[in-house]
Image (cartoon, grey):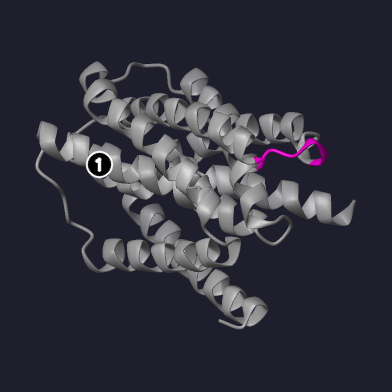
């Protein structure tokens, strides 16, 4: 029971930070859940958690979305998340966890040292962002940071940014959840977490929206990036220690 309570609190924190930081909760949730579940099981639970998380965001940030980006970024993302999810079955879980930790470290450092980095707002970058974010989401469980870089190039308002990202993410998570199911990652013994995570996602998204209304996005973004870096370092140390890599 104590472990479940800790899991819920950490999942709630991941949802709040993911909503405010614009990276999505999976950047935090995947490494956090790795302390409680096998990495392949984490992928399955994350996909289910993210479906409810995105539905919550679509309800709370319903001021509009960018239809063009749903096609140019969302469609490639859905195709490549299926490829990434299928490929995950051929990797040892410990190697996926190691790759995830390095991914978190590199992404956070890249954003911290190049905070003004942006892509050009064109179709090629939208498609490329969709391909990379979808593949990373399928293989590692998280690709929101890559999608965040691509979306930020188009000058969207906060609510449209989050709504557009949530629609794309909903397609990604729905697709990979099906692949994960056939891969055997969604286990019956973990299904009790579904209603719990639904409540967590709704509360976390709502609390994240309140935070967005009160503080500077730039300051909080830096805090989130430092937390992602710390999460990546802890995950890397844990992976090396437990697996003798």
Q: Is residue 112 above or below residue 160?
A: below
Q: Tag 1, which secondary structure?
A: helix
Give me the residue at 43% from left, 23% from top. 61
Residue 23 visible at all: no
Tell me which secondary structure the magenta stretch mostly adopts.
loop
Residue 198 picture quarter: top right
Give me the residue at 26% from left, 17% from top. 67
Q: How many numbered circles are shown?
A: 1
Is-magenta flag for residue 187? yes
Left or right: 185 in relation to 55: right
Give me the residue at 48% from left, 42% from top. 85
Q: Which residue is under mark 1?
A: 129
Q: Is residue 46 above or below residue 203?
A: below
Quadrant of image for the C terminus: bottom right
Where does residue 232 sit, x and y in percent of width and height?
Answer: 49, 67
Left or right: 108 in relation to 51: left
Mark 1 closeness class: few <14, some 14–19, many ≥20 residues within 10 Å: many
Left or right: 194 in relation to 44: right
Is-magenta flag for residue 140? no
Q: Which residues are magenta?
A: 184-189
Q: Is residue 175 above or below residue 235?
A: above
Furthest-front residue in this view: 90
Left or right: 150 in relation to 109: left
Give me the residue at 28% from left, 40% from top. 131
- Seen from the viewer's position, the closer of residues 215 and 101 is 101
Furthest-right residue in this view: 1
Where does residue 94 sit, x and y in percent of width and height?
Answer: 58, 66
Where does residue 202 sit, x and y in percent of width and height?
Answer: 62, 29
Where does residue 46 sit, x and y in percent of width and height?
Answer: 59, 42
- Seen from the viewer's position, the closer of residues 191 and 86 is 86
Q: Is residue 92 above or below residue 185?
A: below
């Amino acid at each position: 029971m104590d472990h479940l309570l800790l899991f819920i609190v950490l999942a709630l924190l991941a949802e709040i930070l993911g909503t405010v930081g614009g990276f999505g909760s999976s950047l935090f949730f995947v490494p956090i859940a790795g302390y409680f579940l096998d990495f392949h099981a984490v992928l399955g639970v994350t996909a289910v958690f993210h479906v409810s998380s995105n539905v919550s965001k679509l309800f709370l940030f319903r001021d509009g979305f960018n239809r063009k980006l749903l096609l140019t970024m969302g469609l490639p993302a859905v195709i490549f998340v299926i490829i990434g999810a299928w490929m995950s079955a051929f990797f040892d879980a410990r190697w996926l966890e190691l790759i995830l930790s390095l991914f978190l470290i590199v992404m956070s450092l890249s954003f911290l040292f190049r905070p003004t980095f942006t892509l050009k707002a064109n179709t090629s970058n939208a498609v490329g962002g969709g391909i990379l974010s979808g593949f990373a989401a399928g293989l590692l469980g998280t690709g929101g940071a890559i999608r965040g870089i691509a979306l930020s190039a188009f000058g969207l308002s906060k609510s449209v940014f989050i709504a557009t990202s949530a629609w794309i993410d909903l397609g990604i998570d729905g697709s990979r959840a099906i692949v994960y199911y056939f891969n055997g990652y969604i286990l019956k013994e973990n299904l009790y977490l579904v209603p719990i995570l639904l409540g967590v996602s709704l509360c976390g998204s709502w609390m994240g929206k309140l935070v967005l209304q009160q503080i500077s996005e730039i300051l909080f973004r830096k805090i989130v990036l430092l937390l992602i870096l710390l999460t990546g370092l802890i995950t890397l140390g844990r992976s090396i220690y437990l697996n003798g890599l």
